[in-house]
Amino acid sequence: MIRKLGIIFLLFLLSGILPACAMIKKEGSTSASGQKARASYYDFSDILIPSELTIDKKHSFVYSTSRLKVGILTFKGRVEPDSLAVFFQNNMPRDGWRLISTLKYQETMLVFLKEDLACIITIKEKTFTTALEVRVGPIEQASSQVKGSR
């Protein structure tokens, strides 16, 4: 009886995970007709987020002024972490972001720069979901740092 329940649980688990993995792989590519994959912009109009992810408003905040918008957006969903990283590597440059560095293994961290902003994208695999954190903040220009240190 316990073995049957274990097999049923495993089948149930796999039936939910496999379709989610297949869906995110489609996100980073274009279809044969050339249409873009389904994704949305949230508070930052230059950072595209796959539609399989749901925003976690409790752990997100955005600060806006007339000249600047910074903050942290957190998301979760059933997506494959490596495919999610590829999604950002493909889509961020389309919105003017330049990939500076990538850290990978226990979690994936992508660092992008654009004008006077930095965007750090962190992807963490959890037990049944993947967590995404998008941090956007200002960067100081090197010349102001040198002047202040003299």
Image (tube, rainbow, N blue to C red):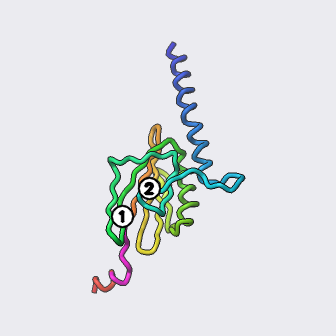
Image quadrant where residue 10 sits: top right
Q: Residue furthest top?
A: 1
**Residue 43, relative to residue 116: is it above or below?**
above
CA distance for labels 2 and 1: 13 Å
Over which residues does the magenta segment extend? 137-144
Residue occupying the point 55% across, 66% down: 93
Disc number placed over residue 70 in the picture, else none: 1
Locate residue 106, reporting x and y percent: 46, 50
Q: Give the residue type that dot 2 points to.
A: Tyr
Locate residue 112, reporting x and y percent: 47, 66
The mark lying in front, picked from 2 and 1, is 2
Image quadrant in which the C terminus is located: bottom left
Residue occupying the point 32% across, 68% down: 65
Label 1 environment density (alpha carbons within 10 Å; few <14, some 14–19, many ≥20): some
Label 2 environment density (alpha carbons within 10 Å; few <14, some 14–19, many ≥20): few
Question: Is residue 32 part of the magenta span, yes or no?
Answer: no
| Left or right: 52 as drawn, with respect to 55 | right
